[in-house]
Structure formats: structure tokens, C-alpha cells
Amino acid sequence: MKHRILLLALGLAAAVPLALLATLGDLAARAPLMLALWGGAHAIYLFASWLAVRGPAHDAGTGEPSRAGELRWGPIVGILVVGLVPRLALLTAPPSLSGDLYRYLWDGRLVAHGVNPYSMAPADPGLARFRDGLFPLLNHASVPTVYPPAAQILFAGAALLGATPLAWKLLLFLLEAALVAVLISLQKRRRLHLERLLLYYWNPLVIVECYGSGHVDLAAAALLLAAIYLQETGRRTASGLYFGAAIVTKWIPILLVPALLRRRAWSVLAWAALLAAVLYAPFLPAGASLVEGLRIYARHWEFNGPLYALLRPLFRTGDSPRLILAAGLAVATVAIAWRARSLSGAALATWAAFLLFSPTVYPWYLIPAVALLPLHPDAGLLLFSGTVALTYAPLAAYRATGAWRLPGWVMVVEYGTWAAVAAGSWWLSRRSAAAARAGHRRGC
């Protein structure tokens, strides 16, 4: 009982500063205060995560050793109620850290009106009739959309509900409810302490980026976790459909194809490919413009990528380092597919590899990785999901000067602490394994 009370107290202590973010107005203009509140909440969250992973020593009320995987609604309801506090506070707050949500609404409105969003960029004169108060809020209005078809369908759903940030966030809320249900089911199957759910549900990054900024990555996480659960329970057709939907919501899940090939999940891959083809079919009249936005993103976007930052000064252009990193990521995904013991483990390791090899790493790219942490707690990623918030440090200067410069110390803190924690965890695991082998020999 003391364990549960302590966890809930920590959760509330973390929820309050996150809820206070909704009172700050423009978070970009008040970045130092935002980061202080976010950082304080994340520090408390890390302690709560450690307690949850360790698990209660005894079963509340009986004094018996706790049984992992046993469904007890009391702790789960407590975790959900505490996590709802900052979510509801931020639900009506306008997105001020990123303008992506406005592009979602723009694309969704086009799709709802039968207009192909891949055919023209928002600034194209052919879309002049759609320019209202939403248009000035768009970033990169000269670039055609980069978002895949399943994301476009979700955007259209929000547009039909009202084409407002609140409509989109409510849609994400429903998708997250499904994600939480899948996480609980996966934890039960693996006999894990269900309090680990808080590793996802209380994570400040998830709360700020999904309910403050409304990023679509939450939808990709929900679809990917559903695909993993269905694959584990032998429902290959449904798994393939969800896996295909995850890919054409956010491209990154396609990196799991080697892991599925390793498991000979042919039907999963076939159904995923079929769904992707069906969803793309209505947009094919866009022709070459179908991939124009994605091509521009892949060739020109760069932000907070650790290995790219090291390689880029060695070349005249960014093309060569991008190709080198793409090849490195391909090798990494194959290696992970060969060694991973579970599909969810492969998904987490593959997502971590993407974060290291990608030239562009925005904070919200971590959301699907955080969704996997209740199944595979990783100290380095838990810490990194907080330090990545430091990439917002230059926001005030950017607003003042129009020049975006990420200080070098930010990446040193982000990736240096991640590397240090990962190295420490590896050393401790090796030491524990050696001690176990020594104990086994003495027993023999």
C-alpha cells in the first residue's frame, strides 16, 4: 500500500507542473520557464519509473509477494487518473511549440473536400480558395505534404469534426485509449507489473508533444503496438493490416520489415503491403508530386541528428553523410532483427537506431519508443526522453532573430547522458551475468 501511495504522490507532483504549462500561453516565448517545469516533472517521473520497474515488494493488503501480470484495476485507475490531469489541462491549449498540427488540419480539410493534398503545396495559386485564418499558421507552405495516406485519412476525420486543434487532440485521445488497452494486455501476457504503464502514461514528453502540440506520432504508436499484440496472439491478418496502417501513418515502422522477415511473418507483410497499396490508390493521380514533399524532407531537413552532426563537416554537401547513415541504419535494422528476442524488443531497438542515424530528430519522434518502454524499460531512453526537451532552448532567440541555431552543448547533454547511461547499464548487466555464472559454478 505504501508503494502505491508513494507512486500516486509522485505522479501528482509531476502532473502539476505539466498542467501549469497550459497557463503560460505561448510556450515558445517562455521557453526557460517551460523547460524548468518540464525538467522538474521529468525528474519526478524518472523516480516513479524506477519504483514501478522495481515493482512492489509485497501484495497490498495480504503481505504476500506481489504477483506480476495480475490485473488489478486499483493501481491502473490511479495511474490513468493522475495522467489525465495534465492531458485535460493541455487539451484546449493552442499548439505553440510546433505548427505541425495546423498542417494536419490543412491537409485534412483538402481531403475532406476531395482535393489531393499531394498535388499542390499550400502556397500554390490553385488552392487560393482554401486560404483562411489557417493558412498563415502553416510552416513550409511551399512544400507539398509529407504525410502518408493513413495520416491523411485521420486528418480528414478531424476536419469533418471541425478542423480545429481540439478536434484533432480528441481524436488522438481516442487512439491513446486503444494504445493503453493494448499495453495493459501485452504486460499481462508477459507477466509484468502493470504499474509499468506509467513509464508511458506519465511521460512528460508524451503529454507535452501529444496534448500540447498534437503530433501524429501518437497515432503511429497506437497502430504499431496493436500490430505487435496481434502478431503475438497469432492474428496475422489483422496484425498485417495494423502494421501497414502504422507505416502509412509515419514511415519509420517500415524499418521493422527485417524483423518480420526474420520471423517469417509472410502473411503479415503481405497484408501490410496490400493495405498500403489500397490507401495510396486514391492519391496516385498526383503523379511525381506524390513523393515530392518526402523527397525534399529526406534531402534537406536536418536537426539534432547526432551522427549526422559528426559527419556533416567532413563533406561539401549533406548528400554523402545522408547516404552513409542510411546504409548504416539498414545494417543496424538487420542486426537488430537477427538478435532481438521479441518483435516489441526489435521495435524499440530499431526506433533507437533510427534516432541515432537520422539527420532529423525532433522531440516527438520519441513517442513510439516511449510507448514501448513499459515492455522494455531502458534507462538511457527514459533519460533521453527528458533531455531532448532542451532542443527547445533556442526558441526565444529564434523568435527574435529568425535564425535557428541549436547550441552544441544541447546535443552533448542529450546524447552524452544517453551514451553514459547505456554504457553503465551494459556494464552492470555484464557484471550481473558474470556473478550469476560464478554462483552457478559454486552450486555445482
Image: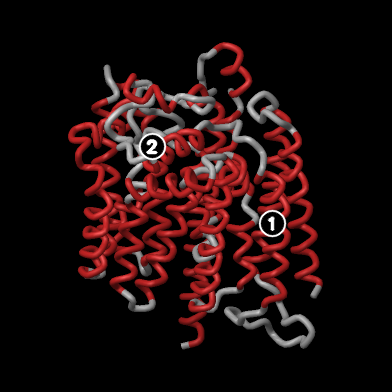
Q: Can the viewer see residue 339 in this picture?
A: yes
**Which residue occupies the foreground of this view, 318 or 133?**
133
Mark 2 = which residue? 110
Residue 390 x %, y %: 59, 33
* Residue furthest to the top: 401
Mark 1 = which residue? 84
Q: Earlier in the sequence, mark 1 or mark 2?
A: 1
Q: Quadrant of residue 400?
A: top right
Q: Residue at x 28, y 32 (%)?
A: 322
Kindly report the distance in space between the C-alpha atoms of the residues bearing marks 1 and 2. Answer: 32 Å
Q: Residue at x 72, y 75 (%)?
A: 74
Q: Residue at x 66, y 30 (%)?
A: 27
Q: Where is the N terminus found, in terms of image quarters? A: bottom right
Q: Residue at x 38, y 37 (%)?
A: 110
Residue 312 x %, y %: 34, 24
Q: Amino acid at mark 1?
A: Leu
Q: Nearer the viewer, mark 1 or mark 2?
A: 2
Q: Amino acid at mark 2?
A: Leu
State left or right for residue 436 relative to residue 341: right
Residue 361 x %, y %: 44, 37
**Which residue occupies the foreground of this view, 326 or 82?**
82
